[in-house]
Image (tube, rainbow, N blue to C red):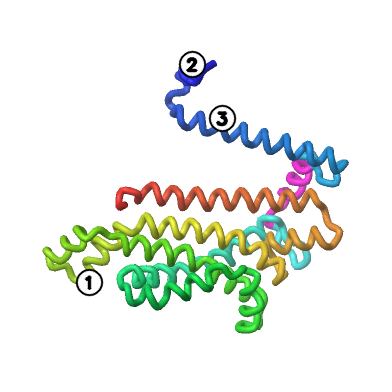
């Protein structure tokens, strides 16, 4: 069956949209492929790596009381929200600094010349290198994790914001001058609308990095969170199936965060 015949077969579902149905089909095929590879790995390791069916059983057990918040026992939902809280604080603080800094860098060649070398030097530094520095500054492991997220989420937003502002066409700038826009009006009517898609691209990249970094941060800092849960299960003789469940949850939440910022990008893409 060629593609045209396949699309014709989908006509009864045209209310859904053919592109949506194709996307769902590709998604299902991808999940099936992943499941097949997973099953092969489980068979090769003689179930040392639990297969999908075994993991599903453990997932149902883990999800029985997800919001449990006793002194000694924390549910998976409690761990998840603890990780999201740290990510939200670090990412939010990073964005509050990165966006204005990127705007200033994109607006001024002098500022760009001063700060760009700093950004390019610090950007490649491993996230794990920032944790000891955060620990030395704050004397607190959870705060050090937030500091690590804060630092690592700065760079994508700074770079993309600066690029967006620096690429504003001269015609747009001339319009502002012709109408005698104040700096504030130029910022709100020309600069931000034009650069907003680039800012959102930076934020999308930054939230992905922040969510990835939280696992490493919580492995080092301990306490409540998905990262520490993975560490505890992996190095204290815990369940491999629970580790896989945590990995799946981390991946799904990361996908949801990415889709959210992708939707914002599409919503404001007219400004580009």
Q: What's the distance in space between the residues labelled 2 and 3, CA to CA?
A: 16 Å
Residue 131: percent from left, percent from top: 64, 74
Q: Are the residues tagged 2 and 1 within 8 Å (C-beta)?
A: no
Distance between the alpha carbons at the discs numbered 3 and 1: 50 Å
The residue indicated by pointer 3 is: 25
CB under 8 Å between discs 3 and 1: no
x 29%, y 58%: residue:
193
Q: Distance between the residues labelled 2 and 1?
A: 57 Å
Which structural element holds mark 2?
A: helix
Instruction: Tell me the crowding category of disc 1: few under 14, some 14 to 19, or many 20 or more residues within 10 angstroms, Cα based.
Output: few
Q: Position of residue 178 (x, y in %)?
A: 11, 64
Of labels 3 and 1, earlier in sequence is: 3
| Residue drawn at the location 67% of the way across and 56% of the way down | 67
Residue at 21% of width from left, 59% of height from top?
172
- Residue 89: tell me if it is visible: no
Badge 3 element: helix
| Residues in magenta, as a range | 55-67
Which residue is at 38% across, 71% downward? Answer: 100
Instruction: Pick the residue in front: 42 or 24.
Output: 42
Task: Say left or right for 161 vs 60.
Answer: left
* Closer to the camera in the image, 31 or 172: 172
Relative to 206, is 43 above or below? above
Q: Nearer the viewer, mark 2 or mark 3?
A: 2
- 237 part of magenta stretch: no
User: Overall secondary structure of the magenta stretch?
Assistant: helix
Mark 2 vs 1, N-terminal side: 2
- To which residue does mark 2 refer? 5
Q: Mark 1 points at which residue?
A: 183
Q: Is residue 118 visible?
A: yes
Give the x, y percent position of residue 75: 71, 57
On the image, the x and y values in percent for residue 204 come to 48, 56
Asked whether, in this view, residue 225 is left or right of residue 61, the answer is: left
């Amino acid at each position: 069956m060629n593609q045209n015949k396949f699309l014709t077969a989908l006509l009864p579902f045209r209310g859904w949209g053919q592109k949506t149905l194709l996307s769902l089909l590709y998604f299902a095929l991808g999940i099936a492929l992943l499941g097949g590879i997973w099953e092969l790995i489980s068979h090769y390791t003689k179930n040392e790596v639990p297969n999908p069916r075994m993991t599903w059983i453990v997932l149902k057990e883990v999800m029985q009381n997800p919001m449990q918040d006793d002194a000694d026992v924390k549910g998976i939902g409690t761990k998840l929200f603890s990780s999201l809280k740290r990510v939200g604080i670090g990412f939010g603080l990073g964005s509050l600094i990165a966006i204005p800094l990127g705007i200033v860098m994109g607006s001024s060649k002098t500022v760009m010349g001063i700060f760009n070398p700093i950004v390019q030097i610090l950007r490649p530094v491993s996230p794990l290198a920032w944790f000891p520095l955060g620990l030395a500054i704050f004397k607190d492991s959870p705060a050090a994790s937030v500091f690590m997220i804060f630092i690592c989420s700065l760079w994508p937003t700074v770079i993309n914001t600066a690029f967006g502002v620096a690429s504003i066409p001269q015609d747009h700038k001339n319009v502002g001058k012709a109408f005698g826009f104040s700096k504030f009006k130029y910022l709100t009517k020309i600069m931000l609308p034009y650069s907003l898609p680039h800012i959102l691209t930076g934020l999308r990249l930054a939230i992905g990095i922040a969510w990835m970094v939280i696992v490493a941060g919580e492995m080092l800092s301990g306490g409540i969170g998905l990262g520490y849960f993975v560490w505890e299960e992996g190095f204290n003789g815990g369940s491999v199936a629970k580790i896989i469940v945590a990995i799946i949850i981390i991946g799904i939440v990361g996908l949801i965060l990415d889709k959210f910022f992708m939707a914002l990008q599409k919503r404001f893409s007219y400004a580009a």
